[in-house]
Image (cartoon, rainbow, N blue to C red):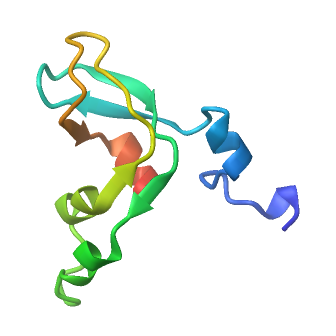
Amino acid sequence: MSKSNKLPHLHTIQQLRQGKNKHKLKCGKCGAVGRFDLGVVLIDPEIVRRVPRNEGVSRKALWDAASFTGYFHCRKCGAGGPWKPTDDVMGFLL
C-alpha cells in the first residue's frame, strides 16, 4: 500500500517499536490524564463476540477486550493501573 493510501491511525510495527503509539489514558487511582505509549494493542475477540449482535459493542466491552504491550506508571501518583479510557484512546480503538 502506498503512503498516500494509508489510514492515519494505523501504525507499522517499526513505528510501534519506536514509541509512536501514544494515547491519553486516565489513571483509575488518582484521575490524572496523561499520554502513554501503548505499544501494540490487542483486542480479545472472545470478549467482543459475547456482545449480542443487535446491541453493538459498547465502550466498556471494547475497553475490557483491549490489552497493551506497553507498561507505564501514572506520572502523578505512580500507579501502574487500573486505567480508564479517554475519548482519544477509544477513537483509536474503533
> Residue 44: x, y in percent?
33, 69
Depth check, front residue: 41 or 57: 41
Up/down of 15 relative to 60, above or below: above
Q: Is residue 34 visible?
A: yes
Q: In which quarter of the image is the C terminus?
A: bottom left
Q: As drawn, is 61 to the left or to the right of 72?
A: left
- Residue shown at 24%/14% (left/top)? 78
> Residue 45: x, y in percent?
34, 76
Q: In which quarter of the image is the N terminus?
A: bottom right
Up/down of 68 relative to 76, above or below: below
> Residue 15: x, y in percent?
69, 41
Report the residue that reaches farthest toward the top: 76
Depth check, front residue: 40 or 6: 40
Up/down of 24 relative to 85, above or below: above
> Residue 24: x, y in percent?
38, 32
- Residue shown at 23%/89% (left/top)? 53
Q: Is residue 94 visible?
A: no
Q: In which quarter of the image is residue 3?
A: bottom right
